[in-house]
Image (cartoon, helix red, strand yellow):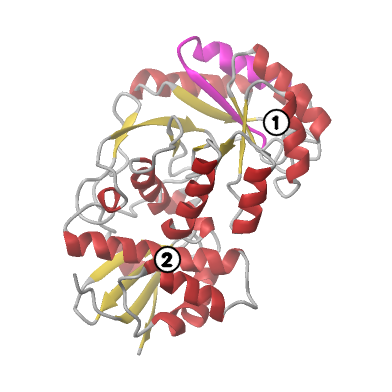
Amino acid sequence: MIFGSISKLETFSNEFVCFVKVTTSEGLIGWGQTSTYNADITAQVFHRQIAPWVLGKDAADIGALITLVEAREHKYPGSYRARANAGLDTALWDLRGRAEERPVVELLGGSAKKLRTYASSMKRDITPHAEAERLVKLRDEFGFNAFKWRVGAECGNDIDEWPGRTEEVVPVVAQALGDGVSKLVDGNSGFSPKRAIEVGGLLEQEGISHFEEPCKYWELEETKIVTDSLSIDVAGGEQDWDLKTWQRMVDIHAVDILQPDIMYMGGIWRTLKVVEMAKQSGMTMTPHSANLSLVTICTAHLLGAISNPGKYLEYSIEGDDYYPWQKDLFLGNPFAIEDGKIDIPSAPGWGVEINPEWLRKAKRQVSTL
């Protein structure tokens, strides 16, 4: 199928979200998203360092375009380049799906279906009993049977959010949720190996099966010490974009479960490289998708297609009070939960429509030939 060349690239951004629209010479369009947070800065990177290299190029070969940008901008490796490239990559996947009238999950070799989710709490400024109460309510109302909550303090160097919180929140929440529920916790790089192993022992006692990012994520050897010491799964990788780092993470088995974030990674095409690394090593993928923007939709499509998915899709339970910028991004509700599961959209492309009213209020920037 002829997609044509990229003739126009548009961004619609605010501080938190940047959507990308690709238009080709054949009149085809696709919508994608850069990574969230400081998205207005990422939009500048997109128009300065992504758009000039891909305008006029064939829209069909996503990998070639991402590789071209990385080569041309080789002096600027790093998170912002990857975050901006994610906007191009995800828009081109959407364009292809719309052109072929198929959802992206099918383009990737899978099929639209229901996915089990885990309800993911982002809060630390909440008492253990209040956290337990709201998670139990979500269990009873929406049928979630997997939950993740926070321990320690983000990059806390063994200093808890407040003294004793970790030792309290682990058993209080675990016991309130009861049996038949998968239980996960996230340390957000908060602990030294020694302290992480101590906390891991408490997690094991309370039936928690997943310990995420226990140590500084950039110190893989520290995390490996914890992984080798505990019987439960240690997970990590959400912050990482560099493929060499990913290969080292896999080679030394720093973690048991890999958690790339599609938007931090630079899109689906680069994330599939991590999927393949994991597959070769017999590891599973439970990607990071910690807000209800396009990242969760893209991750659902990915999990519906790969042969080594984890047990569930991360689903943020934080609403407009915590993430007010999530409000009204899309038409309808593509994030509806029933019996703890979400539908992978079956309409062409990503299967969602961005709210025109949101776009109208955003800052629009255009790059053309």
Q: Quadrant of residue 188?
A: top right
Is 182 contained in the magenta span? yes
Is 62 contained in the magenta span? no
The residue under label 1 is which amino acid type?
Thr
Question: Which quarter of the figure is the N terminus placed in?
Answer: bottom left
Left or right side of 19 for 49 = right
Give the number of the mark in front: 1 or 2.
1
x and y, in percent, of residue 279 in the image: 49, 41
Question: Which residue is rendered at x = 57% and y = 11% of the image?
Answer: 175
Toward the viewer: 136 or 6? 6
- Residue 312 in the image: above or below residue 171: below
Which residue was labeled with disc 2?
87
- Residue 174 in the image: above or below residue 49: above
Question: Which residue is rendered at x = 42% and y = 56% of the image?
Answer: 268
Toward the viewer: 142 or 103? 103
Query: Magenta part of the protein: which range?
Result: 167-187
Q: Given contact means CB atoms under 8 Å apart, are the residues at marks 1 and 2 in contact?
A: no
Whether residue 162 is visible, yes or no, is no
Whether residue 314 is visible, yes or no, is yes
Q: Secondary structure at mark 2?
A: helix
Q: Quadrant of residue 141?
A: top left
Left or right side of 90 for 344 = left
Q: What separation in Å lies between label 1 and label 2 (alpha carbons)?
A: 34 Å
Which residue was labeled with disc 1?
227
Question: Which residue is rendered at x = 40% and y = 51% of the image?
Answer: 293
Q: Secondary structure at mark 1?
A: helix
